[in-house]
Image (cartoon, rainbow, N blue to C red):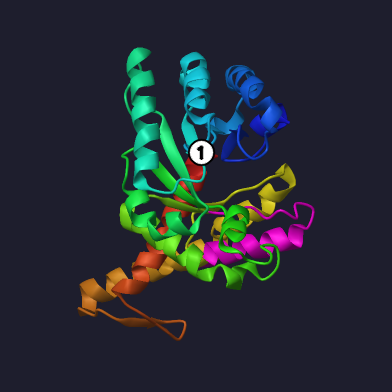
Amino acid sequence: MMQKAAASDADEVIFDLEDACAVSQKVEARKTVAQALQSCEFTGGKVRAYRINGVETPWCYRDLIDVLETSARFVDVVVLPKARTADDVRFVDRLITQIEQSLKLPVGRIRLEVLIETSKALLQAEAIAAASPRLESLIFGVADFAGETGARDFRDNHQTTFAFARQHLLTAARAAGIDAIDSVTVQFKDLTRVEADARHAASLGFDGKWAIHPAQLPAIHDAFTPSAEALTRAQRIIEAYAKADQQDGLGAIVIDDEMVDAATLTLERRRLAIAAKARRAG
């Protein structure tokens, strides 16, 4: 499974020491993850990551030490689950810093991604997002969040049920200048559901979505990558606005029966930037 993931079309592969790892295998799994990070062929320049256990567990600090001391050169990102406060992030940051210094690696090269999975974390999302310069993204963990808040289910109507949580996380990430990543769709064989969830997240402004099976990747990529038609229209709007400004001194124009002003350009430029980033990644 690790080899298949490394060779997939995913932008990032995360090996898991937390929820997908049985308690009886927590210690032994560190060796497996370290070996996989060193030996798997990660195609397409994808990000190499692994998820540790939360800082309130007895496994967290050894998850960092045992894997990074042997494989830090093969790790781009550490994923921190169930962060509750900014101090949780700072603890992991400082321990990684000490490991980097001990191994004589550039301090800060290993990045952090943080899962928001509890009500306390959500209410402190702004502080968490700004807790470390290593931070790359906030990720919404819908299953744990649903369980912690007492929701009856997280599989149905989750777009409405967890609307506030998603918007709050997204706003906190944007304020900190980092990415916002949406949660998984657990019905991995229901590709229609995957597509709907991905398009909803993209429409909100999320930068990506976790996948739990390679079959989900095409639908997710399609949802978050602007279409050729959208890019053509974005370029046409930007060029028309610039021309109207330079030739006629206009700050608002009409294109396709829609008003276009400076605020509109932000959205269109973002579409072009996403497409450019996708081309570089490819």
Which residue is at the far right? 189
Coordinates of residue 255 in the picture (x, y in percent):
42, 80
| Neighbourhood count class around disc 1 (C-alpha, 10 Å): few under 14, some 14–19, many 20 upward | many
> Which residue is identified by label 1?
54
* Rendered image quadrant of residue 241: bottom left
The answer to which quarter of the image holds residue 152 is bottom right
Give the quadrant of residue 3: top right
Q: Between 21 and 273, which is closer to the camera in this rendering?
A: 21
Q: Amino acid at mark 1?
A: Gly
Residue 189 x, y percent position in the rendering? 79, 53
Q: Nearer the viewer, residue 18 or 190?
A: 18
The stretch of residues the image draws in magenta is: 182-203
Left or right, 137 with respect to 212, comes to: left
- Pick whichever, 172 or 226, lies toward us: 172
Rendering coords of residue 218 (x, y %):
68, 50
Quadrant of the drawing holding the N terminus? top right
Q: Which x, y percent locates residue 108?
A: 34, 29
